[in-house]
Amino acid sequence: MLKYIIKRILVAIPVLIGITIIDFLIMTMVGSPLELLQGPRVSQAAIETKRIALGLNKPVYVQYWIWLTNLLQGNMGYSMKSFQPVSQMIKTYIGPTLLLMSVSLFVSMLIAVPAGIYSAVHKYTPQDYTVVTLSFLGSSVPGFFLALVLIYIFTVRLGWLPSSGMYTLGAQKGALDVVRHMIMPVIVLATSMAGTNIRYIRSAMLEILRKDYLRTARAKGIGRFLVINKHALRNALIPVITVLGMHIPILFGGAIIIEQVFSWPGLGMMTMSAIISRDYPVIMGVCLMSAIVVLVANLLTDVIYALVDPTITY
């Protein structure tokens, strides 16, 4: 296992470098941040001075090499807008994003596992069709649309939940206040993931329930609850873990959009602000971190396979 993990990490290094090269090229094709400074009151000499100060007068490959050299020294650069260190900005904003992602992932599995098992056990019944229909609906509704619907119902009409931020302005910060602000973003993110996972769990359970060893377990007198939730579920989780590993990067991207809708103070707000102002160092920092999240999620998925199914060896 250790040799496998080390090998995967070594393979991930050139992959990360390749991703950063592609991101840097695409970013420079979009345009220069100096275009936002142009106006009747700004002279071309001032823009050229700014270009030289930011190093944008150098060829693209030289700019990338400078960025990569600084990165290897632990320096992700400084924001062109706020002049703060990019690493410090990411450290500040990543906490709320990870909190939102982890809670959404937990809630989605809390919904998907029982619903998927229930649907498989009651296959081709009205209950099964209801669960499957709801799962299709959950995965089909766009997140931003569901977010606006929830804001209209629970904030505008009922006034039960806050629609923006992580804390109530002017109030004492506390866990309960954070939970109230998290309810709607978590519902939006968890709904889409749960809808997809329910169908995967149902499909995996239907296949496992037809296996001979489960018939043997039933014949031995093992209770129905243990047969389904211990013997069948553990083997059914293998394809679900694959989907779960794919959901983590999707969740990371979806959280950025939902953070914008709910003004959640996470990486989404920082990323959108950097894109609008063409803040190259911040964009590259977020892209690098996103790539690392994807690679780590894939590695953890492969490692968890062995924990779920001891017959899997590397």
Image: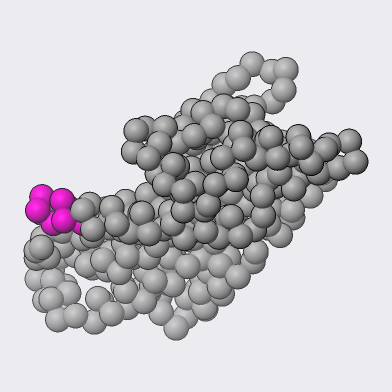
Image quarter of the N terminus: bottom left
258, 111: nearer the viewer: 258
Residue 100 visible in the displayed image: no
Q: Indicate how the structure is coloured in the image.
A: one colour
What residue appears at the point 47 percent right and 60 percent down from the top-left corner? 22
Image quarter of the C terminus: bottom left
59, 148: nearer the viewer: 59
Pinpoint residue 88: horizontal percent, then vertical percent.
49, 28
In this picture, is 158 found above or below 191? above
Number of callouts: 0
Residue 102's quadrant in the figure? top left
Residue 149's quadrant in the figure? bottom right
What residue appears at the point 28 percent right and 80 percent down from the top-left corner? 207
311, 64: nearer the viewer: 64
Q: Is residue 7 magenta?
A: yes
Q: Give the range drawn in magenta.
A: 2-8
Secondary structure mostly taken by the magenta-highlighted segment of the chain: helix
